[in-house]
Image (tube, rainbow, N blue to C red):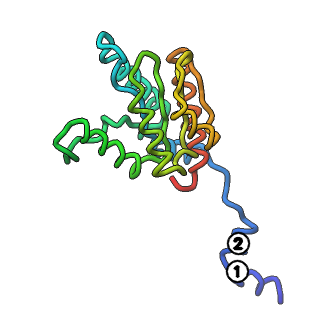
Protein backbone atom coordinates (compact mmCIF):
# COMPACT_ATOMS: atom_id res chain seq x y z
CA UNK A 1 0.00 0.00 0.00
CA UNK A 2 1.55 3.28 -1.12
CA UNK A 3 1.65 6.48 0.87
CA UNK A 4 -0.99 8.14 -1.33
CA UNK A 5 -3.40 5.23 -0.94
CA UNK A 6 -2.75 5.21 2.76
CA UNK A 7 -3.80 8.87 3.05
CA UNK A 8 -7.23 8.07 1.56
CA UNK A 9 -8.02 5.24 3.99
CA UNK A 10 -10.61 6.16 6.59
CA UNK A 11 -10.01 4.79 10.02
CA UNK A 12 -12.76 4.01 12.54
CA UNK A 13 -13.39 6.74 15.13
CA UNK A 14 -11.90 4.74 18.03
CA UNK A 15 -8.58 4.50 16.18
CA UNK A 16 -8.58 8.25 15.56
CA UNK A 17 -9.41 9.01 19.21
CA UNK A 18 -6.70 6.65 20.46
CA UNK A 19 -4.05 8.61 18.56
CA UNK A 20 -5.64 12.05 18.89
CA UNK A 21 -6.86 12.54 22.47
CA UNK A 22 -9.22 15.39 23.27
CA UNK A 23 -7.38 18.70 23.54
CA UNK A 24 -6.81 20.48 26.83
CA UNK A 25 -9.27 23.30 27.59
CA UNK A 26 -8.46 26.60 25.93
CA UNK A 27 -9.01 29.94 27.62
CA UNK A 28 -11.77 31.21 25.32
CA UNK A 29 -13.58 27.93 25.69
CA UNK A 30 -13.04 28.06 29.47
CA UNK A 31 -14.85 31.41 29.73
CA UNK A 32 -17.81 30.07 27.78
CA UNK A 33 -18.01 26.96 29.93
CA UNK A 34 -17.72 28.97 33.16
CA UNK A 35 -20.75 30.95 32.01
CA UNK A 36 -22.69 27.74 31.26
CA UNK A 37 -21.82 25.99 34.54
CA UNK A 38 -25.04 25.64 36.55
CA UNK A 39 -24.04 26.27 40.16
CA UNK A 40 -26.76 26.22 42.78
CA UNK A 41 -25.89 27.98 46.03
CA UNK A 42 -27.74 26.40 48.95
CA UNK A 43 -27.55 28.32 52.19
CA UNK A 44 -29.62 29.74 55.03
CA UNK A 45 -31.97 32.58 54.20
CA UNK A 46 -33.00 33.31 57.78
CA UNK A 47 -31.09 34.39 60.82
CA UNK A 48 -31.15 32.25 63.94
CA UNK A 49 -32.47 35.35 65.74
CA UNK A 50 -35.23 37.77 64.69
CA UNK A 51 -32.88 40.79 64.92
CA UNK A 52 -30.75 39.71 61.96
CA UNK A 53 -33.63 38.72 59.71
CA UNK A 54 -32.08 39.58 56.33
CA UNK A 55 -28.33 39.34 56.99
CA UNK A 56 -28.04 35.68 55.94
CA UNK A 57 -29.85 36.24 52.65
CA UNK A 58 -27.70 39.32 51.96
CA UNK A 59 -24.50 37.33 52.45
CA UNK A 60 -25.67 34.65 50.00
CA UNK A 61 -26.69 37.31 47.47
CA UNK A 62 -23.23 38.91 47.71
CA UNK A 63 -21.65 35.48 47.15
CA UNK A 64 -23.80 34.95 44.06
CA UNK A 65 -22.84 38.41 42.76
CA UNK A 66 -19.17 37.65 43.31
CA UNK A 67 -19.40 34.34 41.44
CA UNK A 68 -21.16 36.06 38.54
CA UNK A 69 -18.46 38.75 38.42
CA UNK A 70 -15.88 35.93 38.30
CA UNK A 71 -17.46 34.53 35.14
CA UNK A 72 -19.86 32.02 36.70
CA UNK A 73 -22.88 33.89 35.37
CA UNK A 74 -25.21 30.92 35.83
CA UNK A 75 -24.75 30.80 39.63
CA UNK A 76 -28.14 30.90 41.31
CA UNK A 77 -29.85 30.88 44.65
CA UNK A 78 -33.07 28.93 45.05
CA UNK A 79 -34.96 32.22 45.24
CA UNK A 80 -33.82 33.06 41.68
CA UNK A 81 -36.19 30.42 40.31
CA UNK A 82 -39.80 31.52 39.84
CA UNK A 83 -42.42 30.45 42.37
CA UNK A 84 -44.88 29.71 39.60
CA UNK A 85 -46.29 27.18 39.35
CA UNK A 86 -47.04 26.80 43.02
CA UNK A 87 -46.13 23.32 44.13
CA UNK A 88 -48.45 23.47 47.14
CA UNK A 89 -50.86 25.88 48.82
CA UNK A 90 -48.86 25.86 52.04
CA UNK A 91 -45.84 28.13 51.69
CA UNK A 92 -43.44 25.87 53.60
CA UNK A 93 -44.40 22.83 51.53
CA UNK A 94 -44.11 24.82 48.32
CA UNK A 95 -40.53 25.84 49.13
CA UNK A 96 -39.59 22.32 50.20
CA UNK A 97 -40.90 20.77 46.96
CA UNK A 98 -39.42 23.57 44.83
CA UNK A 99 -36.01 23.05 46.43
CA UNK A 100 -36.06 19.31 45.90
CA UNK A 101 -37.25 19.58 42.30
CA UNK A 102 -34.60 22.15 41.34
CA UNK A 103 -31.83 20.15 43.04
CA UNK A 104 -32.82 17.06 41.06
CA UNK A 105 -33.25 18.79 37.70
CA UNK A 106 -31.07 21.86 37.32
CA UNK A 107 -27.52 22.08 38.71
CA UNK A 108 -24.20 20.81 37.48
CA UNK A 109 -22.79 21.47 40.94
CA UNK A 110 -23.86 22.57 44.40
CA UNK A 111 -22.34 24.92 46.96
CA UNK A 112 -23.61 24.18 50.46
CA UNK A 113 -22.97 27.28 52.58
CA UNK A 114 -23.26 27.07 56.36
CA UNK A 115 -23.24 30.50 58.01
CA UNK A 116 -22.82 31.26 61.70
CA UNK A 117 -25.81 32.93 63.43
CA UNK A 118 -28.14 31.64 60.71
CA UNK A 119 -30.77 28.91 60.70
CA UNK A 120 -28.88 26.12 58.89
CA UNK A 121 -31.62 23.50 59.20
CA UNK A 122 -32.75 23.99 55.59
CA UNK A 123 -29.24 23.57 54.16
CA UNK A 124 -28.72 20.47 56.31
CA UNK A 125 -31.97 18.99 54.95
CA UNK A 126 -30.92 19.78 51.38
CA UNK A 127 -27.57 18.06 51.92
CA UNK A 128 -29.18 14.91 53.31
CA UNK A 129 -31.74 14.99 50.46
CA UNK A 130 -28.96 15.05 47.87
CA UNK A 131 -27.19 12.24 49.71
CA UNK A 132 -30.37 10.16 49.59
CA UNK A 133 -31.74 10.96 46.11
CA UNK A 134 -28.81 12.10 43.96
CA UNK A 135 -25.55 11.12 45.68
CA UNK A 136 -23.48 11.42 42.48
CA UNK A 137 -24.13 15.16 42.59
CA UNK A 138 -22.10 15.31 45.81
CA UNK A 139 -19.01 14.62 43.69
CA UNK A 140 -19.66 18.00 42.06
CA UNK A 141 -20.36 19.83 45.28
CA UNK A 142 -18.50 21.84 47.88
CA UNK A 143 -19.23 22.57 51.52
CA UNK A 144 -18.29 25.98 52.89
CA UNK A 145 -18.59 26.40 56.66
CA UNK A 146 -18.02 29.54 58.66
CA UNK A 147 -15.41 28.97 61.36
CA UNK A 148 -16.61 28.18 64.89
CA UNK A 149 -19.82 26.64 63.53
CA UNK A 150 -20.33 23.04 64.64
CA UNK A 151 -22.12 20.82 62.16
CA UNK A 152 -24.33 18.01 63.38
CA UNK A 153 -23.53 14.33 62.84
CA UNK A 154 -26.40 14.19 60.30
CA UNK A 155 -24.49 16.69 58.18
CA UNK A 156 -21.01 15.31 58.85
CA UNK A 157 -22.04 11.72 58.01
CA UNK A 158 -22.57 12.21 54.26
CA UNK A 159 -19.48 14.43 54.08
CA UNK A 160 -17.30 11.70 55.57
CA UNK A 161 -18.86 8.90 53.50
CA UNK A 162 -18.43 10.78 50.22
CA UNK A 163 -15.04 12.22 51.23
CA UNK A 164 -16.21 15.78 50.69
CA UNK A 165 -13.75 18.38 51.84
CA UNK A 166 -15.11 21.06 54.13
CA UNK A 167 -13.72 24.55 53.55
CA UNK A 168 -13.76 26.66 56.70
CA UNK A 169 -13.80 30.41 56.17
CA UNK A 170 -13.58 33.44 58.46
CA UNK A 171 -14.22 36.40 56.20
CA UNK A 172 -16.44 37.15 53.24
CA UNK A 173 -13.30 37.35 51.08
CA UNK A 174 -12.38 33.81 52.20
CA UNK A 175 -15.89 32.60 51.38
CA UNK A 176 -15.71 34.17 47.93
CA UNK A 177 -12.32 32.66 47.13
CA UNK A 178 -13.31 29.19 48.37
CA UNK A 179 -16.49 29.39 46.29
CA UNK A 180 -14.58 30.36 43.12
CA UNK A 181 -12.12 27.53 43.74
CA UNK A 182 -15.00 25.09 44.26
CA UNK A 183 -16.65 26.24 41.03
CA UNK A 184 -13.37 25.72 39.17
CA UNK A 185 -13.15 22.15 40.53
CA UNK A 186 -16.78 21.48 39.56
CA UNK A 187 -16.11 22.92 36.10
CA UNK A 188 -12.99 20.82 35.64
CA UNK A 189 -14.80 17.65 36.77
CA UNK A 190 -17.68 18.28 34.33
CA UNK A 191 -15.82 20.17 31.58
CA UNK A 192 -16.75 17.97 28.63
CA UNK A 193 -20.42 17.72 29.64
CA UNK A 194 -21.02 21.47 29.84
| Distance between the alpha carbons at the discs numbered 2 and 1 | 7 Å
Helix, strand or loop at label 2? It is helix
Residue for point 59% across, 43% down: 27
Compared with residue 27, is residue 17 higher up or lower down, i.e. above or below? below
Residue 159: percent from left, percent from top = 58, 37
Point out the residue furthest to the left here.
89
Q: Nearer the viewer, residue 15 or 182?
A: 182
Q: Mark 1 points at which residue?
A: 11
Identify the image quadrant of residue 186: top right
State the residue in front, 152 or 131. Answer: 152
Image coords of residue 100 (percent x, y): 36, 46
Task: Give the residue at x 64% y 40%.
Answer: 163
Classify residue 48 as left or right of residue 33. left
Residue 51 lies in what quarter of the image? top left
Residue 133 is tagged as none
Tell which circle, 2 or 1, labels the residue nearer the N-terminal end.
1
Residue at numbered disc 2: 16
The answer to whether 143 is drawn above or below residue 100 in the figure is above
139 up-or-down from 116: above or below: below
- 101 or 27, which is in the foreground? 101
Q: Where is residue 69 in the image (x, y as percent from the top left)?
A: 45, 29
Residue 15 seen in render:
yes
Q: In the shown orientation, is residue 59 left or right of residue 95?
A: right
- Mark 2 and mark 1 residues within 8 Å of each other at the beta carbon: yes
Query: How busy is the neighbourhood of tag 1: few (under 14 within 10 Å), some, or many (20 plus)?
Result: few
Q: Is mark 1 on a helix, strand or loop?
A: loop
Amino acid sequence: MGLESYNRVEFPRFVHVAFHPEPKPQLADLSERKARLKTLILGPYRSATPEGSTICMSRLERLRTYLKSSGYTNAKLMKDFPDVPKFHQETATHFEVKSKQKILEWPTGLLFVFLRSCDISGVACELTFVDDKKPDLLNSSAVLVEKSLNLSAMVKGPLVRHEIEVNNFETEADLNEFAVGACMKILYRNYWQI
